[in-house]
Structure formats: structure tokens, C-alpha cells
């Protein structure tokens, strides 16, 4: 999907130049069609008709900007891309079929055999596996501490091309210093990519702190109701058009127009959802800290969190909606708490209006070795709670059922 924001060719929504982020979340995209629809149109078409062969040739050659084929150009997908780019404060965005495909297109577009990546050892399990898998193609990755910039600096090599960070990370909610990592990356001639899944642009805009690229699993908070799988990558339009669009045209990790439309509509309520979910998550995190059966709580909004001050600086003063905690009894204790819930959904997704609970060691990070999980701090007694919009007292009661059986 082409991402260029160019009013000389494809038109833009007519908005005042100084509108704020919440307005962009509702209004940015493409102008309405001749029918004057108020809700964005859904273009379910595989291809687009051209007036003649010469025009078709010019459009396929990128000599004329137009919608050509929905593998890489579709109006609904462009509306979603423009809206997300506006929220992240970037000039370009490319939508992908999933969050993991956004990482895949990054590797395929920017890296080659002999290149090196530095990545946090505490990121999402599938992200770690994907970087490990690319070792067979000659792309090596060093995994370092999420929170220690000195380790990132020490891992830099002359052939380092990319630093990959996820903040807060999954599931420990550790926060990395985006500005410090950007300085390290740029001094070494590399790019910094930040996975902004946990915060979304409603709370955090990584480019303001120096990040070059921002990645999303739109499946999470951007959709907000667990309906579709989607991904996106935001950054400079020139870089995306030059590097990522050609890969998309060839490889086709394409976001469907319907899924793009669902995410587009989800972003309209993103800000108010994240504020409400963050408030509930903070209350639950404080409650969990007082429970005898809970050994530790991980939540950036808590004063006890090691990177609390940094999180408040980077995340608009809010902790987000994800709380992880360690219970007594290792895996058996964690499973007992999860199994006792009657409101929380036992599923590995997050960002939903419905609260979800998962055991990372055997789900999202189950494909990693136990040694890697231990190095990242992901223990068998850990549970991850992605707080939704239910009544917070009902959620406390739901967790209390299982915690009561673990004792002190």
C-alpha cells in the first residue's frame, strides 16, 4: 500500500492545519466520495479500472499516483494509514496483514545477509523467534537488556543496521529510554524501530523521542475489540515509499480493506479507551500489590516500578492497560488463578475492551527456551492481565477467587 501523503495527486481530507490528535483520530483519511458518506467507505475490490492502456501503464510504473491493485493500493487501507501516521506524528505509514508481518517487511526491506540487529531480550516471544530465524539468511541479532543503554551500546557493531525496542515490553512492562537508544542507533549509523503496541499513539509517540520507525500490531489497542488481525509501520514517507512499498508489491503481506476499515473505526475511540483502561489498570495494580498471594506486580504506573519516572515522561503520565504479576506456587498457582476467573477471558490477545488473562511462559513466550525466558524475567508464576472496560470491582473479585486459594 503506497503511503505517500501528497495532496497534488490523491486528495486529502480538508482539515485545518492545527487540529489536534483527538480530532485527527476521528477525521483524518480521504475525502468522502461523490455520495457524501459520513462514515468512511469500505472499498471491497481487488482491482481498479483505468481509462485506457497508457494510463494503466503510467500508474503501474508509479508515474501517476492512483489506486491500482489492492495488494498495494486501496482507498480504505490508505485511510487507515493516513490516520495512524497523523496520530504517530509521521509523514508515512504502511499497513500490513499483522504485527508480525510489519516486522517481517522491515527485515526484508532494510536488511541483507551480513547485517546485524540489536534487540531487547524482553520483547514479544514471536518477535524474538523471527529475528532468530533470520540467522539462517545471514542476519545476526544480539539480544540485550531492555533497560540498560550500556548493553545496547556494547552490542553495537560496524554492521549494525537496526535497533529494535518494545516499550513497555511484553509481559514485564519494562520501559526503555527511547531517546538514549535513538542516540546510540544514530551514532552508529543505524535506525531505531519502536514497537508501540502497549501504549499506542494515544499515550506515546516514539518519534518525538528520536525513533525512526514505529511498529504496531493493530490487532491490539488500535482495533480495541479483538475483531481483526492487522499491523502497520509508521515512519518517513520517503523511506517507506523507497524501501517498504516495493517489498509489499512483491511479497504481499497485505492488510485487507475490511480489516483496515475495522481498525480505522477503532482508532476513533482509541484515546478515551486508553484513558479509561489505564485508570482501571492502575487501581487493579495497586490492589494486587496488597494481596498476600502476589509476590510482585509489574506496572509502569506504580511508583514501585523501576522505570516509573521514565514511563510517565514517555507515556503521557499514564501506565497503560497491561499489568503483569507473579503469584505464589509457580505454574500451578498461576494456572489456578487463571482457571478460577469467570469474567476475564483466558486468551493471549490484549488491547480488548474485554479483560484478558494469560500465562506468558506457556503461550505468548512458549516457543522460547526456558533459559531465554529466565534471562528476560518471565517466570512460571507470572500472569499477564490486559485490563478492559469492565467494572473494576468485578475484576478484583474475579481475581480474588483464585488468589484466595493460594494462601499467604
Image (spheres, helix red, strand yellow):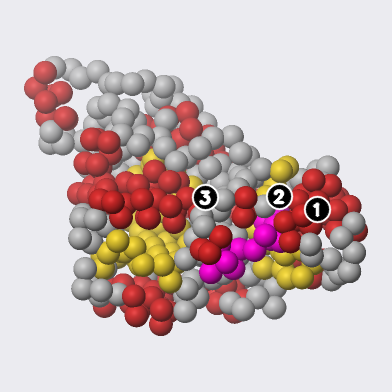
Helix, strand, or loop for circle 3? Answer: loop
- The picture places residue 361, in percent across and down from the top left corner, at 62, 55
- The picture places residue 353, in percent across and down from the top left corner, at 68, 44
> Residue under circle 1?
337
Helix, strand, or loop for circle 2? Answer: strand
Left or right of 305, for residue 50: left
Work out whether residue 390 or residue 189 is closer to the camera in this orientation and state it: 189
Q: Is residue 384 magenta?
A: yes
Residue occupying image coordinates x 61% and y 45%? 349
Left or right of 73, for residue 350: right
- The picture places residue 377, in percent across and down from the top left corner, at 59, 68
Q: Is residue 103 magenta?
A: no
Q: Are marks 2 and 3 in contact (CB under 8 Å)?
A: no
Q: Which of the two discs, 1 and 3, labels the residue nearer the N terminus?
A: 1
Q: Which of the two discs, 2 and 1, labels the residue nearer the N terminus?
A: 1
In space, the residues marked 2 and 1 are separated at their CA atoms by 10 Å
> Residue under circle 2?
357
Q: Are marks 2 and 1 in contact (CB under 8 Å)?
A: yes
- The picture places residue 83, in percent across and down from the top left corner, at 43, 46
Asked whether the viewer can see residue 279, the reply is: no
**Image depth: mark 2 or mark 1 in front:** 1
Q: Which mark is residue 152?
A: none
**Image depth: mark 1 or mark 3 in front:** 3
Region rendered in magenta: 373-390
Residue occupying image coordinates x 38% and y 75%? 152
Q: Which of the two discs, 2 and 3, labels the residue nearer the N terminus?
A: 2
> Residue under circle 3?
367
Amino acid at each position: 500500500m503506497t503511503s505517500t501523503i501528497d495532496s497534488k495527486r490523491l486528495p486529502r481530507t480538508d482539515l485545518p492545519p492545527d487540529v489536534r490528535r483527538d480530532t485527527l483520530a476521528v477525521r483524518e483519511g480521504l475525502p468522502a466520495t461523490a455520495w457524501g458518506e459520513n462514515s468512511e467507505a469500505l472499498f471491497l475490490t481487488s482491482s481498479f479500472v483505468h481509462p485506457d492502456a497508457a494510463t494503466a501503464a503510467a500508474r503501474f510504473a508509479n508515474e501517476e499516483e492512483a489506486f491500482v491493485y489492492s495488494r498495494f493500493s486501496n482507498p480504505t487501507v490508505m485511510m487507515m494509514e493516513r490516520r495512524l501516521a497523523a496520530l504517530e506524528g509521521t509523514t508515512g505509514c504502511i499497513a500490513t496483514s499483522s504485527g508480525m508481518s510489519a516486522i517481517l517487511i522491515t527485515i526484508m526491506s532494510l536488511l541483507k545477509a551480513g547485517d546485524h540487529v540489536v534487540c531487547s531480550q524482553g520483547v514479544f516471544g514471536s518477535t524474538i523467534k523471527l529475528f532468530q530465524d533470520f540467522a539462517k539468511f545471514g542476519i545476526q541479532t544480539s539480544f540485550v537488556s531492555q533497560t540498560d543503554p550500556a548493553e545496547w551500546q556494547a552490542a553495537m557493531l560496524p554492521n549494525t543496521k537496526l535497533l529494535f525496542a518494545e516499550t513497555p515490553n511484553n509481559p514485564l512492562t519494562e520501559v526503555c529510554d527511547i531517546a538514549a537508544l535513538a542516540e546510540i542507533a544514530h551514532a552508529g549509523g543505524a535506525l531505531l524501530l519502536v514497537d508501540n503496541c502497549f501504549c499506542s499513539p494515544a499515550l506515546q509517540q516514539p518519534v518525538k523521542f528520536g525513533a525512526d520507525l514505529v511498529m504496531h500490531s493493530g490487532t491490539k489497542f488500535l482495533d480495541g475489540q479483538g475483531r481483526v488481525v492487522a499491523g502497520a509501520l509508521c515512519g518517513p514517507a520517503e523511506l517507506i515509499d523507497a524501501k517498504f512499498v516495493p517489498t509489499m508489491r512483491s511479497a504481499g503481506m497485505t492488510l485487507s480493506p475490511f480489516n483496515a476499515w475495522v481498525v480505522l473505526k477503532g482508532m476513533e475511540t482509541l484515546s478515551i479507551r486508553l484513558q479509561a483502561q489505564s485508570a482501571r489498570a492502575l487501581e487493579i495494580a495497586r490492589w494486587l500489590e496488597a494481596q498476600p498471594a502476589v509476590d510482585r506486580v509489574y506496572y509502569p504506573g506504580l511508583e514501585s516500578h523501576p522505570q516509573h519516572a521514565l514511563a510517565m515522561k514517555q507515556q503521557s503520565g499514564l501506565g497503560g492497560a497491561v499489568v503483569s504479576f507473579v503469584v505464589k506456587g509457580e505454574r500451578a498457582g498461576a494456572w489456578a488463578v487463571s482457571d478460577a476467573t469467570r469474567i476475564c477471558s483466558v486468551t493471549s490477545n490484549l488491547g480488548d475492551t474485554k479483560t484478558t488473562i494469560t500465562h506468558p511462559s506457556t503461550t505468548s513466550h512458549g516457543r522460547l527456551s526456558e533459559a531465554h525466558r529466565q534471562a528476560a524475567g518471565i517466570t512460571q508464576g507470572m500472569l499477564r492481565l490486559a485490563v478492559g472496560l469492565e467494572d473494576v470491582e468485578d475484576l478484583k473479585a474475579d481475581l480474588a477467587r483464585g488468589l484466595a486459594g493460594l494462601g499467604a
